[in-house]
Structures are given as structure tokens and as C-alpha cells.
Amino acid sequence: MKILAPRGTADILPKDQKIWSKVSSTCKQIASEFSYDRIDTPIFENTELFKRGVGDQTDIVQKEMYTFKDHSGESITLKPEGTAPICRSYLQNGLSNSPLPIRLYYISPMFRYERPQAGRLRQHHQFGCEAIGDPSPQVDAEIIELGWTYISRLGLKNIDLRINSIGDLKNRELYIKELKKFLMDHKNKLPKIDQERLIRSPLRVLDSKEEVTAEITKNAPKCIDYLQNEDLEHWNELIEFLNVIKDTHTQFNYYIDHSLVRGLDYYNRTVFEFQPRESTSQGTILAGGRYDPLIEKIGGPVTPAIGFGSGIERMILEIKKQINKTDLSDKTDIIIIHIGETTKKSYAMASKLRRLGISTVLAPKRSVKAQMRYANNINAKFVLIIGEKEIKSGKAQFKSLHSNIEDFDIELKSDLIAKKFNDFQKISYA
RNA sequence: GUGGGCGUAGUGUAGUGGUUAACACGUCUGGUUGUGGCCCAGAAGAUCGAGGGUUCAAAUCCCUCCGCUCACCCCA
């Protein structure tokens, strides 16, 4: 029986490493532009953190966590999301004593026991940013702009921001009551699944995929109509900020989505998602919101905060969908072809060239024809041919496989070869 | 957790009861003596996802399991 990777996990193969490192270096670059500092928290945490932070009744905690007891009987959970651990670390390490808001980002694997499908894995990776300690809408705007900058820097087009406000707990309760009342009036017309949802979590009826329901909820009461005082002010001001962002980023586009509700308990006020315009069901590539109640829930002082998480695998899916597939794997700069009893000397030459920063391989010991074929098949840029003749004369043939540079002889000195190679590189980019 | 589709060489597919499972791409070798890409010839590579059952005979029919995939639930 072959051993396979566990369900819902994936190897990141050599051919994909280049795009992965491109995405993660973009994360770091953008975070740094916005002055966010990196933080890493452990892969696992005490289970209690997620129960209190994410919410005991959420699907994530109820059925999706990788939870186990360690040898001391402690209940441990592989992190299903990034925000609660950051807040835990923020409290534990006294980051609350730094000038607030503090700006943090992370890149980390996440674990959720779910049924895998396109864009959904049991282990996936998230890039996330959190700004802790500032209640004002300018930070909401900053976080959203950061997310947008990240997306557009990766070259993605046709991505929309959906945004909504779910206010605070009090007006949300009031709103839910009104929404329930409204939906009850149409209960008989609702599909079974939404009748159930109406009882379990009425907000979910809003983003139902049933057409009948969508038709009905068009006229449903809207959450933002129930915002009051500071919540309303916050919302209105955020919209102004969004318009500022729109003025400075040509492709930026947002729309208010009254059906947008998020599945984690800690959110309040601002919630948002970035989604490709033509996306399937797992299309959301970046999502977040304000989570002012969270830190208090896990035992800290009342502390406002906002952030987002972005799935790297989904991001890469979207990049692959949108951007022409050029061969992204690294190319060999020089391959050395060796004939006769020159293998040791050729080996030494490869070694020297590498130390000069040139990606070099020694061709496998086969016939010259086969070595050349190999050189071509791995897409090497140049070939250096070393035979007994060359060792005697001290000069070897240097040959380009792609450009129309003519073959020529070059002295068998690594620094000269390296220099020549680098000169050619410059020409080809000019 | 629920429901649909699918598992045949590295990859993509054909084959729907009957002799050594086919094709394309990829890989390797060769097409005289030390030169790639095109072309030609050849080779290697598959316990037909696993286990069980029906049958004289199973890749093909049935059952179970595993995996992939799509949708739902939910989410990045």
C-alpha cells in the first residue's frame, strides 16, 4: 500500500516554488511598505484560546479543529486561524505597552478539518495583517488598502471589494429580531434549507445561494439601517475613506453588500471580502473585519482591532487563472559537457562557477549527443564543452542554446567564463 | 457531515466481459568516430486506486474501503 499525503494536504513541488516565493516576498514587501512587523506564533495553541476567541458555537470550533490531548492531558489545537493567536501573543508579551496601534503581519499554515475541494484544503497558508489598538475608521481603510495593494501588486485584475457593517452586539440583536420578523412573514416561500437557517442563524439566510431566497431578501431590512451613533459615524467615515482610496488606485472598486456576514464570532462593525468578479464558490481570496470584542474575550482589556487573512493557495489559483503560464522554474545557467577522461576537471569547474554565483550543473556521463540532448531538455542557457583537447589547449567551446550568439572558444578559467556569462545576461535584458 | 462525477504507464486519454491493455506527450538509447532543438528507428515504464464477490473468463458487472473532483454546509 502506497503512503500518500494526508487528505487535503498538498506538496509544494519544485515547479511551484517560484510562484510561492513570489507571493510570499510580495506579502513581506507590502507589509513593510505599510510598516507592519512580522510576528510568528506557534503552530498549535491551547484549545481554550479558540473556543473563547473564535467562539464556541462557530463551525470552526464545533467541527473543524484538529484537537488532541498531549502526553500531559492538555488539550491542544492546530491553529485554524491566525487572529486569536496574535491577540494572545499581544497580551502575553506586553505588546499592549507599545505605542498603539501596533501593526503586525504573519505568514503561517492553518489547519481545518474540512472536506477538501477547489480552493479548500485541510492545511493551507495565510498571509494576515492585524492593526491592534485603534478604533478609528482610518485604520479600517488602511487595512483594506493594504489588502488591495497586495492583490494588485501580484498583477490581479477584476477583483471587487464587498463591504458591510454589522454594528455592535446591541444593534445587531435588534436587527436580527427585525430580520427574523421579516423572514417569518415569507417563511412558507423559503426553501427548506433556509427555513432551517432562519432558526439556526438568521443572518446566514441573507447570503443563501437559493434564488427564491435571494429574491425575497432583496427587500429585507438592511443591517446598516440599524446602525446607531458611533457605529453609524464609523461607517459613514469609512465610506469616505474608501472613496479616497478609489481616487488613488485606479482599479479599486467596492460595493456595499448587505448580505455579507462573517462566520467568526469576534467581528463587529466593518466586515469585508475581496473576491474575483468571476469566481466560483471558494473565490474569496482575502477577508477580514474589525474585531473589537476579541481581546476582551480572551481575557485582556477592551482593545479595538482590525485585520484580514488571505489564503495563499487561493491567491496562487487566481494568479494561475489570470496570468500567462510562463515556465516559472529556475533555469540552469551553464551546463558542462565532458568528454573522455575530463570528468574530475569538469566537476571542479562546475564547482568554481557555482561559487561565482552561476547556476551550474555537470551533464550526466553519457554520449556527447545524449549530454547535449539533456542540456536542451533542462533548458540550460549555455553549454561549456570540455574534452581532452580542451584541457590540453586550455580553451573550451562556449555555446548558447537559446540566443543566436555564435559559438566561440574561451579560456578555461572560471572567472573569465563567469564574466562572459554575466555580459551576455546584461545584453539579453537590454 | 450531505449529495453528484471520477480513479488505466510520469502526464493526458482510448479501451464497457474474451488471446501478450492501446495512443499521444514526456523519459532513455540509437541514426558511425566529440555537439542539442526538427525528423526517423527502437527501448523502458501500468500489480488497470485497494480488497472482496459474480463468471469458464473482469480494466470492463456487483459490494466495501481509500483517494481525487464538483456542489452543499462553512470558509482563506
Image (cartoon, rainbow, N blue to C red):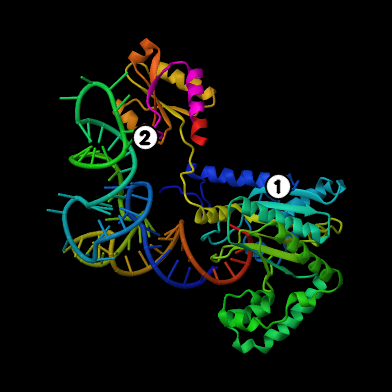
Looking at the picture, does residue A421 appear above or below residue A178? above
Instruction: Determine which residue is flagged by label 2.
Output: A376
Which amino acid does the dot numbered 2 rest on?
Asn
- Could you tell me how far apart the alpha carbons at marks 2 and 1 are, in whole angstroms? 40 Å
Let me know if residue A194 appears in the view: yes
Circle 2 crowding by C-alpha within 10 Å: few under 14, some 14–19, many from 20: some
Identified at 67% across, 76% down, the residue is A200
Magenta stretch encompasses residue A412: yes
Magenta stretch encompasses residue A256: no
Please state the horizontal and vertical placement of residue A206, each as a whole percent of the image. Answer: 65, 76
Q: Chain of mark 2?
A: A
Left or right position of B8 against A212: left
Residue range of the region highlighted in magenta in the rendering: A402-424
Q: Foreground: A316 or A107?
A: A316
Looking at the picture, does residue A194 appear above or below residue B25? below
Q: Chain of mark 1?
A: A
Which amino acid does the dot numbered 1 rest on?
Ala
Instruction: Determine which residue is flagged by label 1.
Output: A31
